[in-house]
Structures are given as structure tokens and as C-alpha cells.
Image (tube, helix red, strand yellow):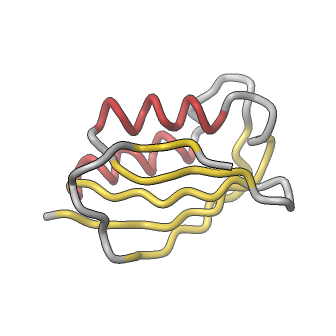
Amino acid sequence: MREGVAMTVRGRVQGVGFRWMTKMVADRLRIVGITRNNDDGSVYIEASGEAADLKEFIAAVRVSPTPSGRVDEVAVSAIEPAPALGKFRVVG
């Protein structure tokens, strides 16, 4: 069953390759969606995928997919899942 989440990630998540490493994790897990930097220094993510894959993706984001990053806080809320067609993209 497909699920979707919106996430705001705070910590040292800009300027450390966080969005690109998040994309690599998403691609490996067949997650579709987007990630972008926010003006307040956080990173925004919308992700959709099969429930088990999405759970693994969220866990990877929580511990920072990049070794030079640090995640202090992750706010997660459910959203309508995106269609399975498409890719995970870094925008903005």
C-alpha cells in the first residue's frame, strides 16, 4: 500500500550534500517525491512509496544520509501519496 509523507528536517542539513544523499536513498528504495532547502536552514521533503520502503526512508533521513550532516529534528505528517510514476527530485 502506497503512503505519502511531508517532512521538515532541522539540523546541519544545508551545504553538506544532504538533499543529494537523500535522493540516493530514495532512488534505492523506489521513493518518489521532492526535496528542497527552506530559507530557515531546514530541508523540506515530500516522499511517497510502499509503506515498508517509506518507513526505511524516514529512518535513513532521521540519522542523516550524509556523514557530514546532523539531524536534530524531523517533523513528519501524512500526505496523499504521489503516483508511482516519476522519480525523486532535488528542487530549489
Q: Quadrant of the N terminus?
A: bottom left
**Res. 84 image quadrant:** bottom left
Residue drawn at x 33%, y 58% as measured from the top left:
48
| For residue 21, side relative to residue 8 (left or right) | left
Q: Position of residue 79 (x, y in %)?
A: 40, 76
Q: Position of residue 67 (x, y in %)?
A: 66, 23
| For residue 47, side relative to residue 28 (left or right) | right
Residue in the foreground of this view, choosing between 14 and 83? 83
Question: Looking at the image, how many numbered discs can be counted on the residues?
Answer: 0
Q: Is residue 27 above or below residue 62?
A: above
Q: Is residue 26 above or below residue 28?
A: below
Q: Position of residue 35 (x, y in %)?
A: 57, 50
| For residue 91, side relative to residue 16 (left or right) | left
Q: Is residue 4 above or below residue 87?
A: below
- Give the residue at the far right of this rendering: 40
Residue drawn at x 73%, y 51% as measured from the top left:
37
Residue drawn at x 41%, y 57% as measured from the top left:
47
- Give the residue at the far top of this rendering: 67
Q: Is residue 37 above or below residue 40?
A: above
Residue drawn at x 24%, y 62% as measured from the top left:
83
| For residue 83, side relative to residue 92 (left or right) | left
